């Protein structure tokens, strides 16, 4: 008899967005004529930019001829894309990295979930709370998170609360931890860390021999000069940090699937006897066995983001979303709501009025304004009392949603 990996049974049966979809469906069944606007799930709405579409057409045509057809590519990605990434995302910021420190992925979710395979099951992990659920759930699956308590916290996970009081910037942990997940600009709170603030985390990691898993999925949304686009802008980070990037939110690649992971050769972890092991060759080895590369088409599409045209077009779309964010923030504040984020990220973190629970406010917005939000508590215990709104809608639908919220409120 095959035995199940019982750690999977500890996971909450539903993914947050399934719960939301269910509630929205109930409402739709009862109110079939109502027009619902979603400011909930973090998916983009604007189409791929022309430079990317042209690259996709070209790559497709190459696939149609025996002379230019491409089969399996290198597991770590094609050089043309790795070189474009190095030049545009790192050399331009005076960050020196080698090509073989860049691993092209099929989106950051897989790699943020998979990377924990490289470290022992009994490492201590810390997460900021609220958090992108993948970090914890992937640790639950291999038994590192322990058991889930009544309060929604996993017994072996150290939670670093992000609250109004600390401006959603968690304090450095009191104890030492082995691994910390950080995501800045942050999903779900939409807040960002300045270079000085991120430096504290890097210094903590250096002093405590801690590994930082840094998710930079929203880097392209940064508007302020003092907010770093990569953790490697901070001195010493290449010894302690692995960084995940995604073209999903940068360039609307949620359906195309492409991103990259940076594993500097200096990053190492220890064996029980204290020998240092580099993570770079280990990740390389892991990928060669479990991953057969990102599609050639997606990689050519990603390369086009870095052309002069591509950069301009991608920026236009990001500006478009950030106009939504600004407008949402101003409008919601004008009706008395407490609103955070939305300055360097496409998310707004809105405090529920009158101490209402996240789910209660979610339902009020759904039933009274027909607007879908995401209950903050779905991202962790400290998310209770907040909802997340995304700026990924069209101007028209976002404005309409705001009008309705204003009217109801
Ligand atoms: C959207 C998102 C990602 C990227 O997911 P992909 O798999 O690249 O589409 C990664 N991290 C966070 C926090 C996200 O919100």
Image (cartoon, rainbow, N blue to C red):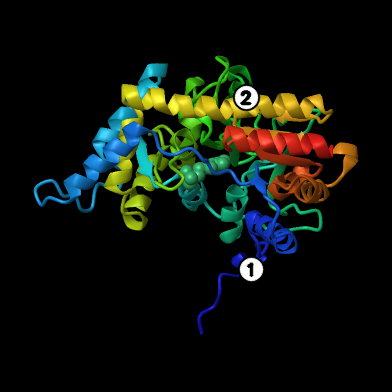
* SS category of the residue bearing label 2: loop
- Is 32 on the left or on the right of 243, as rendered? right
Q: Which residue matches tag 1?
A: 9
Number of marks in picture: 2
Relative image position of residue 119 (x, y in whole percent): 50, 49
Q: Could one spot residue 88 in this view of the protein?
A: yes
Q: Nearer the viewer, residue 365 or 169?
A: 365
Residue in view at x 56 percent, y 34 percent: 209
Q: Is mark 1 within 8 Å of ligand 1?
A: no
Residue 16's place in the image compared with 103, above or below, is: below
- Is 59 on the left or on the right of 218, as rendered? left
Relative image position of residue 323 (x, y in whole percent): 59, 25
Relative image position of residue 175 (x, y in whole percent): 71, 37
C-alpha distance separating marks 2 and 1: 36 Å
Residue in view at x 51 percent, y 21 percent: 234
- Is 236 on the left or on the right of 17, as rendered? left
Residue in view at x 34 percent, y 46 percent: 284
In the displayed image of the protein, which residue is found farthest to the front? 33
* SS category of the residue bearing label 1: helix
Q: Quadrant of residue 191?
A: top right
Q: Which residue matches tag 2?
A: 193
Q: Nearer the viewer, residue 228 or 322?
A: 322
Relative image position of residue 67 (x, y in whole percent): 9, 48
Residue in view at x 69 percent, y 38 percent: 401
Q: Could one spot residue 96 in this view of the protein?
A: no
Badge 2 crowding class, 10 Å Cα cut-off, few under 14, some 14 to 19, many 20 or more, is some
């Amino acid at each position: 008899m095959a035995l199940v990996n019982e750690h999977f049974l500890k996971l909450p049966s539903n993914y947050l967005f399934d719960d939301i979809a269910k509630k929205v469906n109930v409402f739709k069944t009862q109110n079939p004529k109502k027009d619902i606007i979603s400011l909930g799930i973090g998916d983009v709405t604007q189409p791929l930019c022309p430079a990317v579409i042209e690259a996709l057409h070209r790559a497709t045509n190459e696939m149609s001829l025996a002379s230019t057809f491409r089969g399996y590519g290198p597991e770590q990605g094609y050089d043309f894309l790795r070189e474009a990434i190095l030049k545009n995302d790192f050399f331009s910021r005076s960050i020196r990295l080698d090509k073989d420190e860049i691993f092209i992925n099929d989106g950051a979710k897989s790699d943020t979930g998979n990377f924990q395979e490289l470290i022992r099951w009994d490492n201590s992990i810390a997460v900021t709370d609220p958090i992108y659920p993948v970090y914890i759930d992937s640790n639950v699956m291999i038994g590192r998170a322990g058991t889930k308590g009544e309060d929604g916290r996993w017994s072996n996970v150290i939670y670093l609360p992000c609250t109004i009081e600390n401006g959603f910037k968690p304090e450095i942990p009191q104890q030492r931890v082995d691994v910390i997940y950080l995501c800045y600009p942050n999903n779900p709170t939409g807040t960002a860390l300045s270079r000085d603030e991120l430096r504290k985390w890097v210094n903590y990691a250096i002093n405590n021999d801690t590994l930082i898993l840094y998710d930079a999925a929203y880097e392209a949304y940064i508007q302020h000069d003092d907010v770093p686009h990569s953790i490697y802008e901070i001195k010493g980070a290449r010894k302690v940090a692995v960084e995940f990037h995604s073209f999903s939110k940068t360039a609307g690649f949620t359906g195309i699937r492409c991103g990259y992971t940076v594993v500097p050769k200096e990053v190492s972890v220890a064996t029980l006897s204290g020998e240092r092991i580099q993570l770079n060759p280990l990740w390389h080895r892991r990928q060669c066995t479990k991953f057969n590369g990102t599609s050639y088409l997606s990689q050519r599409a990603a390369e086009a983001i870095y052309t002069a045209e591509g950069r301009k077009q991608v920026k236009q779309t990001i500006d478009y979303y950030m106009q939504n964010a600004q407008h949402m923030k101003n409008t919601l504040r004008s009706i008395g709501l407490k609103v955070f984020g939305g300055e360097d990220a496409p998310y707004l973190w809105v405090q529920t009025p009158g101490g209402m629970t996240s789910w209660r406010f979610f339902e009020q917005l759904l039933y009274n304004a027909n607007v879908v939000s995401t209950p903050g508590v779905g991202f962790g215990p400290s998310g209770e009392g907040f909802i997340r709104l995304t700026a990924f809608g069209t101007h028209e639908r976002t404005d309409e949603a705001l009008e309705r919220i204003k009217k109801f409120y």
